[in-house]
């Protein structure tokens, strides 16, 4: 995904880096990239009204993640996280996320994570709720079947 343009993503969330995000090498530490991924996806779901972290009986648990790093991000950069759905299953969804530094056209990092929807009480897989599925379908792009 190193050469993936911004146009390959259905939605973006801008997030400012923080002073504390930088490590001793002067760039954002790798662990923060996963936080950007998680924040971008969950903020989108909350904003679309299909995620209530306190009351929903069905929740998405992250079961797989991955990230490739291409160039450094540092404070005070702004990260623009592009998100799309690569695969929408019965009870799982695979997101692809790319992190763009400021106005750069190619990503500084790109990765994925998989949510498996489970019943909160039993922790057993359950179908993605219909409202969430409709929202997730909007993140599936034609070039990303």
Image (tube, rainbow, N blue to C red):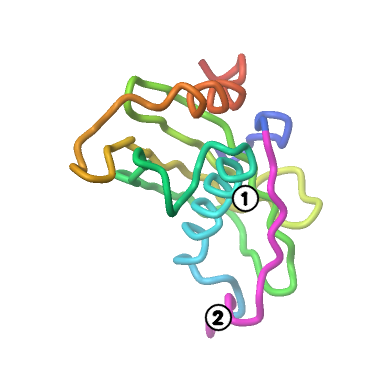
Rendered-image quadrant of the N terminus:
top right
Which callout, 1 or 2, points to the residue nearer the camera? Answer: 1
Residue 120: percent from left, percent from top: 28, 44
Which region shows up in magenta?
A: 11-24
Q: In this view, does 34 lie to the left or right of 14?
A: left
91 relative to 5, above or below: above
Which residue in the rendered view is the most extreme toward the bottom? Answer: 24
State the residue in front, 13 or 4.
13
The residue positioned 21% from the left and 43% from the top of the image is 123
Secondary structure of the residue carrying tag 2 is loop
Residue 87 on the magenta segment: no
Q: Does the segment drawn in magenta span residue 17?
A: yes
User: Depth check: 58 or 94 in front?
Assistant: 58
Task: Name the side, left or right, on which 139 lies relative to 31.
Answer: right
- What residue do we see at 57% from left, 45% from top? 46
- Badge 2 crowding class, 10 Å Cα cut-off, few under 14, some 14 to 19, many 20 or more, is few
On residue 25, the disc is 2
Q: Which residue, given by chain and number where applicable, does mark 1 sit on?
A: 99
Of all residues, the one furthest to the front in this rendering is: 55
Residue appearing at x 69%, y 74% in the figure: 75
Q: Where is residue 77 in the image (x, y as percent from the top left)?
A: 74, 66
As displayed, is residue 20 above or below residue 82?
A: below
Say which of 92 and 70 sits in front: 92
Distance between the alpha carbons at the discs numbered 1 and 2: 20 Å
7, above or below 54, in the image: above
Given residues 5 and 64, the one toward you in this image is 64
């Amino acid at each position: 995904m190193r050469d993936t343009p911004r146009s390959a993503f259905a939605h973006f969330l801008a997030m400012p880096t923080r002073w504390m995000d930088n490590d001793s090498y002067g760039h954002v530490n790798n662990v923060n990239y996963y936080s950007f991924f998680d924040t971008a996806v969950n903020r989108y779901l909350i904003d679309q009204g299909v995620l209530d972290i306190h009351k929903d009986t069905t929740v998405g648990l992250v079961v797989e993640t991955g990230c490739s790093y291409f160039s450094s991000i540092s404070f005070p950069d702004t990260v623009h996280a592009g998100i799309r759905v690569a695969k929408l299953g019965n009870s799982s969804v695979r997101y692809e996320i790319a992190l763009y530094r400021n106005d750069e056209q190619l990503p500084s990092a790109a990765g994925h994570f998989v949510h498996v929807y489970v019943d909160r009480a039993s922790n057993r897989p359950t179908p993605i709720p219909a409202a969430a599925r409709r929202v997730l379908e909007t993140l599936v792009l034609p070039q990303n079947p």
